[in-house]
Amino acid sequence: MLRGGEAARRARRERTTPPGRRLARRLPVALVVIGVLFDVATPARYTAAPFFSAAPLIAAPLYPLWATAGIALAAVVSELLLAVFHGVEDYQQSATEVSTVVVVALLALAINRVVRAGEARLASERDVSEAAQRAVLPVPPARLAGLAIAARYVGARAGARIGGDLYAVQDTPHGVRMIVGDVRGKGLEAVEAAVVVVGAFREAAEQEATLEAVAHRLERALRREGARRAGLDEQEGFATAVLAEIPAGDRSLLRVLNRGHPPPLLLTPEGGLRELVPSTAALPLGLGDLGGRPDRSDETFLPAGALLLLFTDGVTEARDRAGRFYDPRARLRGSQFSGPDDLLDVVVEDVARHTRGGPADDMALVAVQRPLGA
């Protein structure tokens, strides 16, 4: 059973910095101290210059400039003072040792500047990427038409903020409607297709009376853009997607339409879990002409306090080192959560723990809760 609530969130925050990095940040100071102790405890013919040289080099990529300069200064001063402490018998050897530490210290400062410049560029790229994500996949409000909402996008690559996975949640005249989908392919082509799907969904969700009609509009939009743009393959540009609707007049009713996507999960307040498998199989969006089957949504009861979880296959296809897939049904069954945010926090962390680092594919997740009394 997975933990939810404040205690779990506090434990997750404590594990934010990897232990190896915390240890590495202490190493430069430890090397200076060890160098001093080594030089004092050993005869004059032994040198601690390797310790003093290593300290600023290790500090360079981990510390800010001022802290790296402090470590470098401490290393140089320690080498000079220890030379005086022992008494200089071989001026050539002492000068060589001090010069080595000084040169390495200056090199460490130069490395620090290069690393910090690279981090600044990366931060700028992340800012642009985050702005793009907010434009294409804006975070839905925490409360929408009496429902509690949360959404997450987790990129598989470090620094990546958006790809072919998509989500959208919208309050419409027909109720709260949502979509979670996964566009075939990677890179900019997948992003273009995701933009097409999200844009078509936002318009169709407002205008169409049924989920079936919304799915038809998305189908047409993908095929139209595939024929018009060279970047979207006309024959292979498709997207799996699941659409859901909680009608405005009945918050206890849930409609789900699945187009070749992993089935959503319905979690009850008591820890129960049900997989919302579609009654009729359907092809992904963009391939509807190959199947010839009309769309049909399924209706189910949405209990008060229940959580609906929609996700992309980046969750279910996450593997551990033994090649075992992550199974959200087995991992979440019997668990209780304080709300949609807590559920998504736990799932994202649990996938990272399962894969020992992070997913191999992007993940988009949406959680919706019908509060008690609603």
Image (cartoon, rainbow, N blue to C red):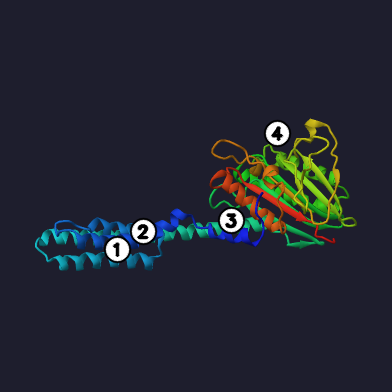
Residue 131 lies, in percent from the top left, at 62, 59
Sequence-first tag of 2 and 3: 2
Within 10 Å of disc 2 (Cα), the crowding (few <14, some 14-19, many 20+) is some
Q: Secondary structure at mark 2?
A: helix
Residue type at tag 2: Leu
Sequence-first tag of 1 and 2: 2
Q: Left of 344 or right of it: where is 216?
A: right
Q: CA distance from mark 4 to mark 1?
A: 66 Å
Q: Nearer the viewer, residue 330 or 17?
A: 330
Q: Nearer the viewer, residue 128 or 42?
A: 42
Within 10 Å of disc 4 (Cα), the crowding (few <14, some 14-19, many 20+) is few
Residue type at tag 3: Ser
**In the picture, residue 338 is in which quadrant?**
bottom right
Marks 1 & 3, CB-CB < 8 Å contact: no
Sequence-first tag of 2 and 4: 2
Q: CA distance from mark 1 to mark 3?
A: 43 Å
On screen, 221 above or below 66? above
Residue 152 lies, in percent from the top left, at 66, 54
- Which residue bears the numbered disc 4? 235
Residue type at tag 4: Gln
Q: CA distance from mark 1 to mark 2?
A: 10 Å
Q: Residue at x 84, y 33 (%)?
A: 293
- Which residue bears the numbered disc 2? 27
- Which residue bears the numbered disc 1? 33
Residue type at tag 1: Val
User: Would residue 303 be visible to someone looking at this image?
Assistant: yes
User: Which quarter of the figure is the C terminus placed in?
Assistant: bottom right
Q: Secondary structure at mark 1?
A: helix
Residue 269 lies, in percent from the top left, at 77, 54
Q: Secondary structure at mark 3?
A: helix
Farthest residue, direction left: 89
